[in-house]
Amino acid sequence: MKKFTVITLGCPKNTVDSRHLIEELTAEGFLYVEEFKKADFVFINTCCFINDAKEESIDEILTVAKCKEHRKLIVIGCLSKRYKNELKKEIPEIDALFGVNETASIISFMRQFKNSDSYSLICAYTMEPPSYRYIKIADGCSRRCSFCVIPSIRGPFKSREPEKILKEAEGFVSSGIKELIIVAQDITQYGKELKGYNLVSLLKDLCSINGDFWIRLLYLYPTDVDEAIIQTVAENDKIVNYLDIPMQHSEERILRLMGRRGTKKEYFKKIRQIREAIPGVTLRSTFIVGFPTETEDEFQRLVDFIEEVQFDRLGVFKYSREEGTVAYNLKGQIPESVKNRRFDEIMTRQALISLEKNRALVGKKYDALIDYIDADLALARLYCHAPEIDGVVILENVSELKAADKVKVLITEAYEYDLKGVIVK
């Protein structure tokens, strides 16, 4: 039986795509293995959102290519969609290239390699641990932010059928999954092409599924987080009080150059509205520093905005000049040294904010979801922790527990991003 593996880079949406590919190939009679050196086919699901992501993808391709031997190297995803011809020319070790949403073409390609005695298998492997699953509710994006290549790679925004989403969610919950993470490039746009059915409709239907599980929302466009969405989160216990709202900047001139809507005043108002309606809510956002023409004064006002808001979680990107975007041709590109300094300044300040907020949790009890257990040590998360991007709770003496267990924990120590706790009755 032919063996394959999938190496996944980039965002949770790629994780979902890889999981579906694994399921499809397993159904075709191929056997999944985790180590690429044991595989006959190595798939690399790539990302090219920013330059760092491109470099990581290329490095991974070259690493596999160096010890390719008998294996076939198949590159899929965003990088191969955007740079197909260049990859063919520069890395001849690649046997095949497929872009995004080309699972049917991949399956057709792979059928030529099936053994005559291959048979369908039940997929026993997923990209996520036993505790959570990402559910992609839409693909593509129609926002046209001037710095972003996603629309040119994944196409315009398209909602998935609610019936398929709900069936997938029900299957996960019935199999013991304790957290459903709703993802799309912009989930606030969900249902815009569906008549009378939107994000709020979907969330209410998800909450009606029987079972003890959390629902987490990633990612919401700031000006479209309306009162209906806020109230839905506030009124439904299954939806954790955690909102990831990428704002990208605080200054109106930069926001307009970015092709973004909203103003600092509107952002302040929206944040107050959310915090008043959802006590204890965790707010996460991302910002871009070093966007073309960003002045030192505008950067400092961004820093002041972050200091005043006191985001619970924060991600910062250094502007990446991407071919094919509107911002690529803007004058006033910022030197890398300046981008690095601005990035470091915000991350240093945010580390202090995060430490202070984590210290406020010490001595309090929370429900925690265990993601991983190794010997007598467990890594768990509270409602305020999204997997892979936020911190964790470190638990000891957990020999009788397993991944996907929910436990009550007392927070005993706080660090800049992680916490330490003990299990209590």
Image: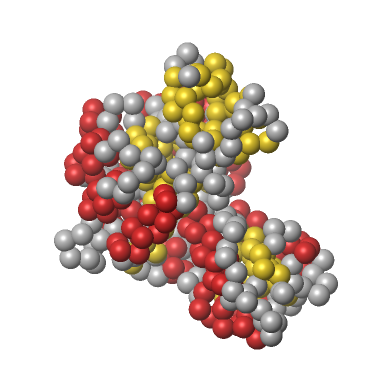
Q: In the image, is 266 to the left or to the right of 297?
A: left
Q: Residue at x 57, y 65 (%)?
A: 122
Q: 22 and 13: which one is in front?
A: 22
Residue 344 visible here: no
Is 70 placed above or below 291 here? below
Q: 271 and 42: which one is in front?
A: 42
The image quadrant where one finds the N terminus is bottom right
Q: In the image, is 330 to the left or to the right of 61?
A: left
Residue 349: x %, y % from top left = 51, 26
Q: Residue at x 57, y 39 (%)?
A: 403
Q: 136 and 114: which one is in front?
A: 114
Residue 402 visible here: yes
Colouring rule applied to residues: secondary structure
Q: Residue at x 29, y 26 (%)?
A: 279
Residue 415: x %, y % from top left = 57, 22
Is 244 placed above or below 161 here? above
- Report how many numbered discs are placed on residues in the image: 0
Residue 130: x %, y % from top left = 54, 46
Q: Quadrant of residue 54?
A: bottom right
Residue 100: x %, y % from top left = 50, 70
Is 95 placed above or below 127 here? below
Is 305 placed above or below 37 here? above
Q: 332 and 18: which one is in front?
A: 18
Q: Residue at x 65, y 56 (%)?
A: 56
Q: Name the residue furthest top.
A: 363
Q: Name the residue furthest left.
A: 196
